[in-house]
Image (cartoon, coloured by chain):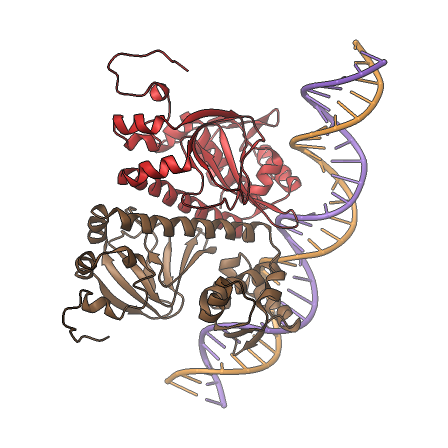
Chain colours: A brown, B red, C purple, D orange
DNA sequence: CGACTACTTGAGGGTACTCAACGGGTGTGG
DNA sequence: CCACACCCGTTGAGTACCCTCAAGTAGTCG
């Protein structure tokens, strides 16, 4: 991180080389508000697998995902687990206004977070309706995504679930595929999967064996190619989409 | 609806005998703001089964659920359907800021709605941050509920799903059970089911036959009693809860 | 080299689905 | 009044899909 001062710039030093500044919640802030916010923030790195927010833990900080993927999970008493959401940069992390978390947040890959104390953000938000509006829009997007996923969980076959998962990741992770998609173009995609087979199974409501079998099936059908168990190549995303049900 | 004027009352006539006024989004409004809002609202009744918002339709109005139950559904191209949410009074209905709906809203029972044009609500909201805050909190609650339900869809057995559904309805519909629950008391519940077996199946990601079989099983176990296929009696809600997984 | 982890593959079984028949309630028409 | 159709829900028989349990492979680390 660059620490050098640049004369007369209104952008706080810490935020200057933040890659998600304009897309994330900070995008709605005026320079002086950004400065105020940046007094409370701090960047942290967490390695894959570390727990970011524990279930039932008191929430004292919020965060923005800067790089990497965060998985949100819920667990039943007997240990059955379900991934209820994935968050990518520049998503906001943390249950607003909640006293304690109702789920566990875990780093799926190595992640960088921009943390801010709960009280600090809520104070700035109270004084700045645009900020609440921005966060409200993210919440609405997450609700849309959760409901889309409910269809996948409730009504799709194992093959369709795995295809839908790969489609989701491809369109969220691969920056090229992401842009192509926004332009309405067809294309290929290539990415390192941020989740283990166990994570995928927990996301899809399947077992790891079933996930593995369906991946093999898609591989043999030529829909996907897999290298090293983690690197995926999708020669034709539109073809993959036809497997999503 | 009472139309008589009451001198010096600051509450708009139309809102005066609104039962959900204080619990719904209107609760945050000052009398003059409520008056402004009420100039645009109109109460409508819709009978069970009628479509309230069509998938992909342009959204021109929002609404508040006053009485009854609304179900939100999504469909795959081949007709497979999934209920992705249920809304009870005083829930807010409609995808805020969205140009078109991404789901279908249908009256599960006879419902009363308080409709308001999209532009009117958004104008009032822009001038009143407390209103957006209130709606944001409902969105957050709905997201919590959607994620809870993802666990049910992905990880529970058919029996647990049906028990979870009955538990959800019991704690949302029966006013007595609702209050007991808030007080942390155990108790019974009794209600008319607002959904058909087909609706339940679509909510749980099951078939109607499986739903029926599981209801029979719970009935034979004495966890529930059913009259007329629609009226349910739950002698011990805590006992039902142990079947939820 | 062995131990460990992550993933794949195989065999067998159980849960929920499919297809089908049946029962009860309601509305219609003779 | 009954006959009939129709809708909704239940029950039964057979099956398919996915899970469970188990073994096997590949990559990594000490």
Quarter of the figure with residue A244: bottom right
Please tell me which residue is depicted at 50% across the width and 44% down the height of the picture: B101
Q: Is residue B217 visible?
A: no
In the depicted structure, whether residue B4 falls above or below residue B233: above
In the depicted structure, whether residue B140 falls above or below residue A166: above
The picture places residue B113, in percent across and down from the top left corner, at 46, 28
Q: Is residue B18 visible?
A: yes
Please tell me which residue is depicted at 23% across the width and 58% down the height of the picture: A116
User: How many numbered markers are drawn?
Assistant: 0
Position of C23 with respect to B29 (left or right) is: right
Residue closest to the eye, B4 or B130: B4
Quadrant of the drawing holding the C terminus of chain A: bottom right
Quadrant of the drawing holding the N terminus of chain A: bottom left
The picture places residue A128, in percent across and down from the top left corner, at 23, 48
Residue closest to the eye, B106 or B62: B62
Residue closest to the eye, B147 or B108: B108
Quarter of the figure with residue B198: top right
Position of B240 with respect to A97 (left or right) is: right
Please tell me which residue is depicted at 64% across the width and 73% down the height of the picture: A222
Residue closest to the eye, B140 or A210: B140
The picture places residue A137, in percent across and down from the top left corner, at 37, 50
Position of A233 with respect to C30 (left or right) is: left
The picture places residue B20, in percent across and down from the top left corner, at 37, 26
In the depicted structure, whether residue B69 falls above or below residue A41: above
């Amino acid at each position: 991180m660059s620490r050098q001062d640049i004369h007369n710039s209104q952008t706080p030093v810490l935020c200057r080389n933040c890659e998600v500044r304009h897309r994330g919640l900070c995008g709605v802030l005026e320079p002086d508000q950004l400065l105020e916010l940046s007094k409370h923030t701090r960047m942290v790195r967490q390695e894959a697998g570390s727990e970011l927010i524990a279930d039932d833990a008191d929430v004292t900080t919020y965060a923005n995902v800067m790089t990497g993927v965060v998985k949100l999970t819920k667990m039943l008493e007997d240990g059955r687990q379900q991934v209820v959401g994935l968050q990518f940069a520049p998503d906001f992390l943390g249950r607003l206004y909640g006293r304690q978390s109702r789920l566990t947040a875990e780093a799926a890959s190595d992640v960088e977070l921009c943390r801010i104390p709960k009280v600090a953000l809520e104070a700035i938000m109270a004084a700045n309706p645009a900020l609440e509006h921005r966060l409200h829009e993210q919440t609405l997007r997450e609700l849309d995504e959760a409901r889309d996923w409910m269809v996948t969980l409730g009504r799709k076959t194992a093959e369709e679930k795995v295809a839908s998962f790969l489609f989701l990741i491809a369109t969220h992770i691969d920056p090229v595929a992401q842009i192509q998609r926004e332009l309405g173009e067809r294309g290929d995609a290539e990415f390192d999967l941020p989740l283990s087979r166990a994570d995928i199974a927990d996301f899809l409501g399947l077992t790891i064996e079933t996930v593995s079998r369906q991946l093999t099936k898609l591989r043999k059908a030529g829909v996907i190619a897999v290298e090293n168990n983690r690197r995926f190549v999708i020669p034709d995303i539109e073809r993959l989409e036809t497997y999503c049900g």
